[in-house]
Image: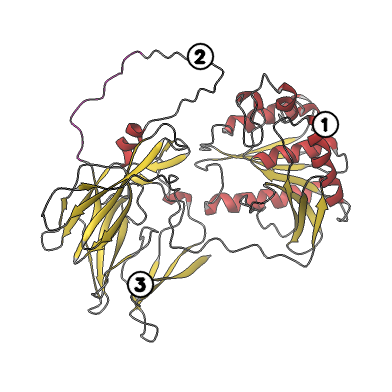
Amino acid sequence: MLDSWRESSTTGPWAWLTAPIEPSISQANPATVCWRDRWVDPDLVGLASDRAPLTRIEIHPDDTSPGWTLPVTNVLPAPLAWHLDRPLVAGLVVRDRHAHPWVADYAARTVTVFDRVRAATSLARPPLVWVGDRLVVLIPSPPTSTPLAHGNPVALEATGPGYVKFQPTLSELAAVVAARPAALDPPAGQAIGLTDPLVVRRLTALDGELHVEYAEDDPASEDGLSWSGLTVPMDGSGPPRRATKTHHRLPRGAPPGRTAPAPEITSPMSITIDTGHHQARLTQHGEGPVAVLWLRDTRPTGTVTLPPLLDTGYGVANLDLPLHWPPDATVESLHPQIVGAVRAALATIDGPVLVGGHSFSATLALYALAHIPELRGAIAHSGCYNRTLTPTGWQHEKRHLWQAPEIYRAFSALEFAHQLNRPVLLAHGTKDSNPATTPEQSVELYRAIVANGGTARLLLLPGAGHAFYYAEHLAFLRTEHRNWIMRWTR
């Protein structure tokens, strides 16, 4: 299936862009590496994209002019660079996993691809910009001639109380994604570097000059980074000048410029459930009787960010469950919130039902399965099932294991695997970069359920991360879900 959306320039011209809704695993680069919880692509010299490449770009000079389809495909799904005064637009095309700039003149209807210029994306959104009549792109850092060393011994010492984290440094990120802003010289087919290599977040044009946001070390920030700025004169009138330091979250792989996934279509059924502290919300989706109760751990005032269950042809009821989890929470205070909300939801559903969830919601689903015998089975995606492997807390629990051992045991499915006596379908990506939800979590729970006489089915998706978005994986999961539902809700 294809998705199309409009991207407009600030001066009137616009483009109608088309790409597959679901990217193919065949387009994923097996050489991607993880830096903290972000995947970076050494061939793109930047963040790995979780969007499919553009397959069609139709340029419209204005709302009344007929469109012109550019003769380029496999375009990087990042915002296009529109010239403010001339009929020019630019982007990056991917060939043999490397990015190259292209420039289209939509008045003359010509496109030039600069095959001899290898572009980088770093962390920049967008990764290229017009500054006057000059197109600035990012180019990879020159290869280092220094051979890799084995490294030196490391000695660490700390005194608590406190939490120790081992996180990769900016230098490790820079080794993969550092790039140089460069001015493209179209006649020569070359790009001329403007600065030293940087981990670039954004390129913008300001008063005829180039502004570059780039990363610096900041151990106190969530990402370990802060963002500084350089202003680069394009006329050679002086060296780059430092600008103000800013703080931003490190961007994810998905670029802006494309519409968000379509909102879920909600049927008339929507009810609230009082958990004793907050209001849970139950909505029904899909046609036919509900076969799956899909739990979604939410914040009391936040929006739902967890994915819904894939369309399987069966009805699904989403239970958005905000938990009251104070700093001194006990199992006795949490248990009735979870079990009570699930029981209240089941009271509105006729027929046999499975329970499921993604990430921490997968744990909640298995907790419900262990304590509510009416549930026929479970579907659990990308969960953490042994909380002793995250002994310094998680999104709800800020106490460490030795302060609240009963909480850690209660929310470790491995601890109550003997109570999972109805079938459990486990799905996990082999490249899940969340340190709490490595694929071994599902493998060990699968072994534990079977060891205790239960029934489990384990799905491992090669190349998939914490969330699933490749077309082949989604098709596989739809079939597995459909068969699991059919098998255990008869």
Identify the residue under disc 1: 332
For the question of whether residue 117 can be seen, the reply is no
Identify the mark nearer the N-term, 1 or 2.
2
Q: Pick whichever, 125 or 404, lies toward us.
A: 404
At 31% from the left and 59% from the top, the residue drawn is 93
Q: Quadrant of residue 402?
A: top right
Identify the residue under disc 3: 10
For the question of whether residue 270 can be seen, the reply is yes
Q: Would residue 356 appear left or right of 168 to someone viewing this image?
A: right
User: What is the spatial separation of the Cα atoms under label 1 and label 2, in whole angstroms?
Assistant: 34 Å
How is the structure coloured here?
Answer: secondary structure
The residues colored magenta run 142-153
Identify the mark nearer the N-term, 3 or 2.
3
Q: Quadrant of residue 221?
A: top left
Whole-percent x, y for residue 209 in the image: 21, 58
Whole-percent x, y for residue 472 in the image: 54, 51
User: What is the spatial separation of the Cα atoms under label 1 and label 3, in whole angstroms?
Assistant: 57 Å
Which numbered disc covers residue 159? 2
